[in-house]
Amino acid sequence: MSGFYQLNERFDGGKTGKRGGMSQKRPPKREHKLIAFKAFFDTDRDILEWWEGMQDGERSEVIRDLLRGYVKGLSLYEARRPKVAVDGSVVLQVLDDTAWIRGALNDMPAYLEGLLGRITVNPIPISVAQPVPEMSDNNLSNDALARRKAKMGKAGW
């Protein structure tokens, strides 16, 4: 009788992993009650589209949040608003940082005024800043010199 268990032998004997062999303790099942309702394709199309649009695994949590919010008397928006756990030390750090920034911005005008007051400005002599090209009247023709003198005479300073 190859391939069959003998009648007086246990079913498993560690061969299939089921019954007997290794015993695994499962935690006791949580008590629960199934809450369900029907959504009709003709009248509840918007609910069905919303339901199908959610990712698998998040539907139960969304329904729980909505029902808990309704029980508390919240609107749908407030009930579904994502909840973020905030550590108190983070809030205090943000408060301290904000106060420091505010103080730095309030002190900045006085600091800049003092800084600019310490800067000395040395005027640059005009002759050094913009060298005047030397013009010689020797390079001009007599006609050009005559025209220039006539224009200079007409100029009203």
Image (cartoon, helix red, strand yellow):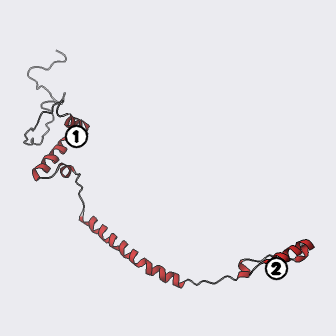
Q: What element carries label 1?
A: loop
* Rendered location of residue 156, percent (x, y): 75, 80
The secondary element bearing badge 2 is classed as helix
Among numbered discs 1 and 2, the one appearing first in the sequence? 1
Q: In this view, does 149 lie above or below 63?
A: below
Report how far apart the C-alphas of labels 1 and 2 lie in the structure: 98 Å
- Relative to 14, say whether 120 is above or below: below
Quadrant of residue 131 within the rendered picture: bottom right
Q: Specify the amino acid type for callout 2.
A: Gly
Pick the front one: 124 or 157: 157
Nearest the viewer among 20 and 38 is 38
Instruction: Identify the mark at residue 26; answer none if there is no mark.
Output: none
From this viewpoint, is residue 135 visible?
no
Residue 154: x percent and y percent?
80, 77
Residue at (9, 38) in percent of width and height: 35
Residue 146: % across, % down? 89, 75
Q: Label 2, on which residue?
A: 153
Residue type at numbered disc 1 = Gly
- The total of numbered circles placed on residues is 2
Q: Determine which residue is flagged by label 1.
A: 57
Farthest right residue in view: 142
Image quadrant assignment for residue 148: bottom right
At which x and y percent is residue 16?
A: 19, 28
> Which residue occupies the extreme top position in the image?
1
Of residues 19 and 154, the one nearer the viewer is: 154
> Does residue 47 appear to the left or right of 90 in the view shown?
left
